Image (cartoon, rainbow, N blue to C red):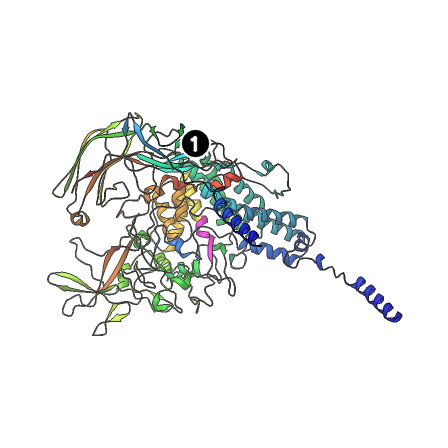
Amino acid sequence: MIQYKYFVIILLSVMMFTACGLDNYDAPQSELHGKITYNGQTLGLRGTGEAVQLQLYQDGYELRDNIPVYVGQDGTFSAKLFDGEYKLVTRNQNGPWVNSRDTTVIKLNGTTTVDVQVTPYFTISGANISLNGSQLNASFTVNQVVQTANIEYVMLLVSKTNFVDDVSYIGREDFRNVEAGALNLSMDLSSNQQVASAKALFGRVGVRTVGADQAIYSDVVRLK
Amino acid sequence: MKLKNIFIAFALVLFALTSCSEFLEREPDTILSDDQVFGDEVMIKSVLSNFYGRITWGQHIDDSYSYTILDEASRSESGPDTRQGFEDNRWRVYDYTLMRNLNQFLKGVRETDVLDADTQKMLEGEARFIRAWLYFNMARGMGGMPIIGDEVFEYSPGMDITTLQYPRSTEAEIYNYIISECEAIKNFLPENPSINAARATKWAALMLKARAAVYAGSIANYNNKMPNPIKTPGGEVGIDANLAQGYYQTALSAAEEVINSGKYELQLNKPDDRGRNFYEALSVKENNKEVIWARDYKYPGQTNGFTQINIPASHAEDIDRAYAGPILNLVEDFEYINDRDGEIKIRDNEGNYIFYDRAEDAFANKDPRLWGTVIYPGTIFKGSPVVLQAGQKYFENGEWHVRTSTPGSTDENDILITSINGPNQSNDQYVNKSGFFFRKFLDETPSASTRGRRSEMWFPRFRFAEAVMIASEAAFELGQADKALTYLNMVRERAGIQPLTSMTFDDIVQERRVEFAFEDHRYWDLKRWRIADKVWNGIQDDPNAQQWGLFPYLVNDPGNPNHGKWVFDKIKIHMSPFPRDFQMRNYYNFIDQGWINNNPKLVKNPYQ
């Protein structure tokens, strides 16, 4: 009888230690890092509101829901995934670039880096943004990449955090009827109380193309 | 002993013969078979009435929050609403369950022999009308969707399910289907208005036809004028530009059929009180000549909570009150009777306050429809004024100061500081935050705002003014300027504002905005004209995208020449801190991945 009791105890403890592990996966460990580039230069984008997304698809499974990958305002993105083969595409009609849904095939094995090449309508270079009293001065060059593209407006933005885009800002001025080339623009902030009371200020310029759903931006510059 | 055995045997036989009470073979008493339903006229009617209860989508009076999403009203309840953009599934309708039920009903009604031929036709017409309305509600959100005709799908194990999977139609096809269905059934339906406009009539079918046609026409027209037209390669989204004329023609002739029917009119029972007249044309069911089809409500059982939760605090009959309030954006879009710029004049050219003897004087000579749509400060509701007073103002050391209190308190001289109605800038419940209350659809019936009863107010879906406005828009787009102007002026003259001598596209936008406020038109109109991303541009402090309020103050400064007068401050409503931001992807709802998993023939929408 005592033997029988031990047998039960051993059986139970064996079951306890072996039961788990069959149907549970470990959390994904591999990381995919990347950036969105044009001619090797990373693009400045809107990073808030899940505005710019890439889509990851994996073949071989019955359902084909994509994994959204959110792109940050510095044009970089990252995702934690299982090892395997993925297909990476830009989201349809999304982003300040020519809509092209060419697939980038990624063989993920451990940490992998990938660059997504796009053709933006415009790029911004040489952005120099400074605060002079209550006046924001910006000089930069808008380079036309796609000859048929037109500028809808150019915007100057200031924000009190380093997230600066067409939605997240405390001061903004839009300039319409602007041509590509070297630009010197300024914005008067003297009547803007939020700017006056802000402990930190960040500036950025952006260009919105007619017909594109997002603007392209310069790097964020700390002003105060 | 023998006797006992016989007795037992006898008892057993008895048991054996009676024990089978068919316990397991009872007819289910909660499920009715098709034969039972379609073998009885009353049952058929109750199935139909169930359908009428399942088709209220979009913005409507039983969902007060839906009014605060756009630029018509702002929420006053609890903390600020951080809404900025619009969801990918905002007001998305995908109800193939209802579609199947409607097709089952159609089959049953066509096969039954308990109905006379006329009733049979009428019921078939109503079911097909509801089906067309369902297709329309899907189409305006998502574009083309699978058209399944009269098919009632059955699944049996082992069958090839790909036969159940239909691909999406093109956007043009789904509108064509709606138009042709309405045309096919219009003579099945009665010509005389139904009670409280609750059931479909010939005129409701024509209205749906006209609306579907003008939607399709404007998509064909304005989508292709965008710098980057929204379309899919298969045409599920996007309509060919050269189809626009045909659609506008269809819309014009369907709308004119309603206009010339003589059954409805631009109701004008009180020409001396146009504001009241407009309210009654929409919000009073008795002897109504304006409304063609509505979601009707009836106590007991079928009531809605719009009046209950939105009634001004001073007039509340129960705990609930002041859930939401219209905003200044809408109020200023109403013109003055003789001035097209509807701005409320609160400051003169030097930036000094303009003083009004009474709060309501600031709204003198506004479009009378404003009175019928919005309760503005000082106007009458149910016989007594609705006082909206944010606080008192007094002049000291060269500038104006504000005195506020908890709502409903008075100062030491018994003068009201902040009204019980508000408005104020707190996070308190039951106090207005915008400076205005709803009047359109607010029920004046006693105890309509109590929890126990609620309101029988209806929600009009089609009304005569829409027929006139569709005719005007369609004629305008077809280049028939005189006709377009005549129809537009019909609406303006009934309202009681100056007629126009010439018109532009913006006049149509403007007129529909004020005439159909809170009637589930604004969102779809801006979408089909492809101007939603321009109006709701997401820019902070934008006059349209940001929500603005108007706070009235009483000047309480004895000795000041303006003591006892009223001044107004325009404020950014703190309950809605972010501007509305309509992005390109919001022009069409997303197709849910779950639906694609079930039916791989569905294609995704652009921007998805």
Report if residue B165 lies within the magenta region: no
Which quadrant of the view contains residue B411?
A: bottom left
Residue A154 placement, left or right of B511: left
Q: Is residue B185 above or below residue B42?
A: above
Q: Quadrant of the N terminus of chain B?
A: bottom right
Q: Report the front residue among A4 and B148.
A: A4
Q: Residue at x 60, y 57 (%)?
A: B46
Between B580 and B462, the one lying in front of the other is B580
In the image, is residue A122 above or below residue B390? Answer: above
Q: Position of residue B139 (x, y in %)?
A: 48, 42
Magenta region includes residue B455: yes
Residue B372 pos. (x, y %): 37, 59
Asked which secondary structure carries label 1, the reply is: strand
How many discs appear? 1
Q: Quadrant of the C terminus of chain B?
A: top left
Query: How far across and down, in percent of the image, does residue B110 sit?
Result: 66, 48
Left or right of B486 in this view: B28: right
Q: Which residues are magenta?
A: B452-467
Q: Quadrant of residue A100?
A: top left
Q: Write down the quadrant of residue A154 in the picture.
A: top left
User: Is residue B260 in view?
Assistant: no
Judging depth in this view, the residue of B63 and B491 nearest the camera is B63
In this view, the residue farthest toward the bottom is: B413
Task: Find the residue positioned furthest to the front.
Answer: A2
Q: Which residue is mark 1?
A: A84
Q: Residue furthest right?
A: B2
* Tag 1 subunit: A
* Type of amino acid at the residue the image marks with label 1: Gly
